[in-house]
Amino acid sequence: MSSEKEAALAALPNDNPTIFDKIIKKEIPSTVVFEDEKVLAFRDINPQAPTHILIIPKVKDGLIGLSKAEERHVEILGYLLYVAKVIAKQEGLEDGYRVVINDGPSGCQSVYHIHVHLLGGRQMNWPPG
Ligand code: 5GP
């Protein structure tokens, strides 16, 4: 079993602070590629493509995963996708890229703070694994 899948199956879906809270507070280092008052984007520690960036809201507001989305989250959800597009341009991904949100154990989510994966720099395959 892949380590990503093992991590996802071991992770408990709850609203406790995650590693991403420490990254937001700069208590642990990350390579930040974009930051404003609403979101932080940084390079994934275990990249699955030449470009692999995680985009997260700075305030979780119960949004531990997409399945927990409420109507009040519509603005931040849209903004996360918009920022993915901005960063894709910044990273020079003119030929295309993939945006992914894993949700829950079956979706291979391992960190319960919603995040958008931006993947690019290689040819993607379909269907995904
Ligand atoms: P998920 O599997 O929940 O969709 O994605 C979580 C992602 O967070 C994984 O791709 C994993 O590599 C990444 N990740 C986990 N811990 C850290 C960390 O401490 N720093 C960074 N930059 N990425 C992390």
Image (tube, rainbow, N blue to C red):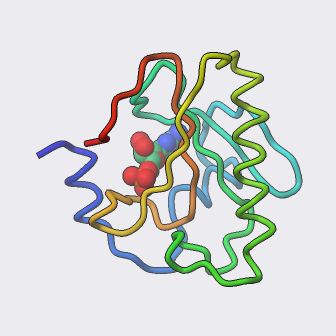
In the image as oriented, which residue stretches furthest toward the front? 126
Looking at the image, residue 97 sits to the left or right of residue 112; the answer is right
Classify residue 33 by image quadrant.
Answer: top right
Q: Nearer the viewer, residue 114 or 23?
A: 114
Classify residue 53 by image quadrant.
Answer: top right
Image height of 127 relative to 78, above or below: above
Residue at image x 71%, y 63%? 77
Coordinates of residue 41 in the picture (x, y in percent): 69, 42
Coordinates of residue 78 in the picture (x, y in percent): 75, 59
Looking at the image, residue 86 sits to the left or right of residue 23; the answer is right
Image height of 11 relative to 32, above or below: below
Residue at image x 81%, y 68%? 75
In the image as oriented, which residue stretches furthest toward the right? 37
Number of numbered markers = 0
Coordinates of residue 109 in the picture (x, y in percent): 38, 60
Residue at image x 75%, y 24%? 89
Q: Nearer the viewer, residue 9 or 124?
A: 124
Image height of 93 relative to 108, above or below: above
Coordinates of residue 116 in the picture (x, y in percent): 58, 50
Looking at the image, residue 61 sits to the left or right of residue 53; the answer is right
Q: Nearer the viewer, residue 113 or 78?
A: 78
Residue at image x 25%, y 42%? 129
Looking at the image, residue 124 sits to the left or right of residue 94; the answer is left
